[in-house]
Amino acid sequence: MSHTIMDHVDVAIVGSGILGLAHALAAVKRGLRVAVFERSTAPMGASIRNFGMSLVTGQPPGIMLELAQQTRAAWLDLAPRANFSAREAGSLLFARSDAEHAVLEEFIADRAEQHGYDAMLLEGEQLAALYDGRFRHHRSALRGSQDLQLYSREAIPALVRYLQAQGVQFHFNALVKEAGDGRISSTAGEFRAEHTVVCAGHDYQTLFADRLGPMNLQVCRLQMLRAAAVEYFPLTHALMTGLSLPHYGAFADLPATAAVRAEIEAKTPALNRHGIHLLVSPTPYQEFVIGDSHHYGADAEPFNNEEVDQLLIGLAEDTLGVRLKVLERWQGVYGNKGPGPISLLAIDAHTTAVLLHTGIGMSVGLGLGERIIAAQVNGIALPDAIAGTSQSLLVPLSVPK
């Protein structure tokens, strides 16, 4: 459809990553006319370069946990309708030492039941029973039952096709040069929109640089791999180790985690130097997405460090108990170092910029987009953790009768 036919829409969305698609989904299901603008030929950024984990267990209590639970439900609803895989096998987080095990015990005793985490601690015979004893060399394991696995490089394009079938108009190869006050200027033409939602990921220069610059935002670059086991290993759970405990909000502030931080620095300082904690996500094709490292800066340097890849492979082989053959290597990049996990900026009464400052778009994105659109349509207030002071400027969206 040409842009002359679609020159006026209810909601224009800049960016076709998971945040942009989440807002498109929330808007179109309310009968709003929606157009999505994407500078690439297809989604190419953080939303297809990730592990595909919809991680509930790792989110901190409060709004992020609520968003993760809401997002999980949305993925399960969408998967059969949009024809992509969303597996409910859950996750296993292995404690390899007494210090890591102490964090898992504290989490189960003090946090899990109080805040509604569906998780249990596996030790002894329960641990040995996993995968015919393959993981008995670990101290214990936290099984998170709410965590989903998606194969992002298939799920995100499938969601685009689903939204197209629902009437959302996608303009690919369309760079939005200016947005504001109900107008969009793009390489696909000029458009009008009652409201524009900008979900441009870690691009802090093309739009609203004057607003974003003072925030001193950074990007995070990650090294990631796709590998296959040399011997048959039908893994269904996503895997983590105690290295993830200092990184995820569900565990990071527990008193016992301080000893884990000290242990990692004392025994494996190279992991801290490269920001490495192990994640292994099985694909639908009996392969594993493995990562990751974390390097921060104003830009993502293009050079991969082989030491990082070798550390990741070694950790994965030790955790899985199998040798691996690497099939692909790539870099993930996402926005980071904001004032909190989310920034919602009201640029003007018709324009909102939504930024995630953490790499959990697949875990919270669908819930976040739903809440922002619902708040605008229904005239309800967003939690301060999402909205900040932005919502007072926004003009409500009118839903067709």
Image (spheres, helix red, strand yellow):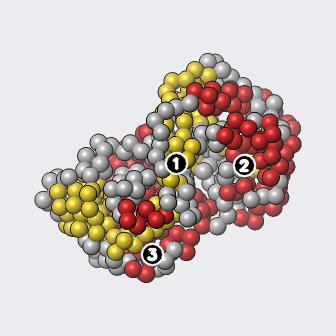
Q: Pinpoint residue 376: horizontal percent, then vertical percent.
A: 40, 75
Q: Which residue is mark 1?
A: 297
Q: Pinpoint residue 316: horizontal percent, then vertical percent.
A: 66, 30
Numbered tag placed on residue 245 in the rendering = 2
Q: Pinpoint residue 203: horizontal percent, then vertical percent.
A: 39, 53
Numbered tag placed on residue 149 in the rendering = none
Q: Distance from label 1 to label 2 (Cα)? A: 23 Å
Residue at 24% x, 63% y is 184
Q: Residue furthest left?
A: 4
- Which of pointers 3 and 1 lies earlier in the amino acid sequence? 1
Numbered tag placed on residue 390 in the rendering = 3
- Which of pointers 2 and 3 lies earlier in the amino acid sequence? 2
Q: Distance from label 2 to label 3 (Cα)? A: 33 Å
Q: Is residue 285 above or below residue 143?
A: above
Tag 2 secondary structure: loop
Residue at 43% x, 39% y is 153
